[in-house]
Image: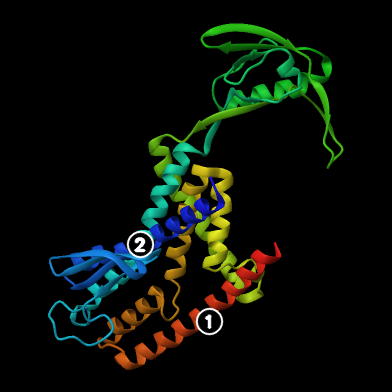
């Protein structure tokens, strides 16, 4: 596939993540009875659309996201279903639903990632035989299962894989190793003499036969449980990176805007294909959810702060003041995006 196709895939992926964010607002807003003016997939000129139950639905030219426009969202509106006339809790849930949908999306793709690509447990099953090695010379093939090493039985689990690996390393310098393997239901025994391999970095020498053990991916319930742990771990790493960026300036040079993200995503998809698509949707969706919850003006987190203040004071912050703060925040955010995009473009030409 051409470079242009990978770029288009990256754009569609980012658009999908942002559209799901907006769908979260849309879904909870409707459940709360808040009126919706339009739900759009994409930005820019309208390609086509339709109207159903008083809501305009549209598909627009630029597929980098979308938006959900509510009645009375940015200005006072006397309509009973206007957002400005809803209780604080309904508005809070509707605003929070955008980042929440990103977390749901990240969780789903993390489960897909674990169930299809990530090794949950290594097994004494040979996944790869390196060419021009003792294993290749004696006829060992991918898919062979090691059942014994020098007469020592090997169980078909993670402990068995580790025992087989350690037995091969330990017995290597003593000469040929007797491997009992199972291939297609047939048992056989092979003698293989390990070769000395020196690590250029450390200078240490070990005896290897030239195989790599494979394993199994997560079972469905394991994937669901493991996704929670993965999300907590990645969230902690993202928050730490954000803290280091704010207080120490670490990672400023690695910041990317839309152009840099699209370039990075397209490169990853070109090299890792389906794995990259699943992994990046998980990572980017989690990132979008976290960033939108930051208590900054113009972001969902900033709006939630105003709603919390309103709930505590039992009266809203004057709309003109809140609007001014969000406008300033949006202006600063746009300036930052323009600056980062400029650096992205320079980076593309330099590289």
Q: Residue at x 83, y 16 (%)?
A: 174
Q: Quadrant of residue 163?
A: top right
Label 1 Cα neighbours within 10 Å, binned few <14 / some 14-19 / many ≥20 = few
Local packing at callout 2 (Cα closer than 10 Å; few below 14, some 14-19, many 20+) is many
Q: Residue at x 44, y 47 (%)?
A: 110
From what the image shows, is residue 229 above or below residue 72? above
Mark 2: secondary structure? helix
Return the x and y of residue 217 as percentages of the image width and height: 49, 34
Describe residue 130's horizontal placement relative to residue 49 as left or right.
Answer: right
- Residue 19 circle label: 2
Q: Is residue 189 above or below residue 45?
A: above
Position of the C terminus by quadrant: bottom right
Q: Is residue 317 left or right of residue 197?
A: left
Q: Position of residue 215 (x, y in %)?
A: 55, 29
How far apart are the two marked residues, 1 and 2, measured between alpha carbons? 23 Å
Task: Tell me residue 338's x, y (percent).
Answer: 54, 77
Above-or-below relation of 340 to 275: below
203 on left or right of 146:
right
The residue at the point 38 percent across, 73 percent down is 300
**What number of labels is visible?**
2
Residue denoted by label 1:
335
Whether residue 29 is situated above or below residue 303 in the rendered picture: above
């Amino acid at each position: 596939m051409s470079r242009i196709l990978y770029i288009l895939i990256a754009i569609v992926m980012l658009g999908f993540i942002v559209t799901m964010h907006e769908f979260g607002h849309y879904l909870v807003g409707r459940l709360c009875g808040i009126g919706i003016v339009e739900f759009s997939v994409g930005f820019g000129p309208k390609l086509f659309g339709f109207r159903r139950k008083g809501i305009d639905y549209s598909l627009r030219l630029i597929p980098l996201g979308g938006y959900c426009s509510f009645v009375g969202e940015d200005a006072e509106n006397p309509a009973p279903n206007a957002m400005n006339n809803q209780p604080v809790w309904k508005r809070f849930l509707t605003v929070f639903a955008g980042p929440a949908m990103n977390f749901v999306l990240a969780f789903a793709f993390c489960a897909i990632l674990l169930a299809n690509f990530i090794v949950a447990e290594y097994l004494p099953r040979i996944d790869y035989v390196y060419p021009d090695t003792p294993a290749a010379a004696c006829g060992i093939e991918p898919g062979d299962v090691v059942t014994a090493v020098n007469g020592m039985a090997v169980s078909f689990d993670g402990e068995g894989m580790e025992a087989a690996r350690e037995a091969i390393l330990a017995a290597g310098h003593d000469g040929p190793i007797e491997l009992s393997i199972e291939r297609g239901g047939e048992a056989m025994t092979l003698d293989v003499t390990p070769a000395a391999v020196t690590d250029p970095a450390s200078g240490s020498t070990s005896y290897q036969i030239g195989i790599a053990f494979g394993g199994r991916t997560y079972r469905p319930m394991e994937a669901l449980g493991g996704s929670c742990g993965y999300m907590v771990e990645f969230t902690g790493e993202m928050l730490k990176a954000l803290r280091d960026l704010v207080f120490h300036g670490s990672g400023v040079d690695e910041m990317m805007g839309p152009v840099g993200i699209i370039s990075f995503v397209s490169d990853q998809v070109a090299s890792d294909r389906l794995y990259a698509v699943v992994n990046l949707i998980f990572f980017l969706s989690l990132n979008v959810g976290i960033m939108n919850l930051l208590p900054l003006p113009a972001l969902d987190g900033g709006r939630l702060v105003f709603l919390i203040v309103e709930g505590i004071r039992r009266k809203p912050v004057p709309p003109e003041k809140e609007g001014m703060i969000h406008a300033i925040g949006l202006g600063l955010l746009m300036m930052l995006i323009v600056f980062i995009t400029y650096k992205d473009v320079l980076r593309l030409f330099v590289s």
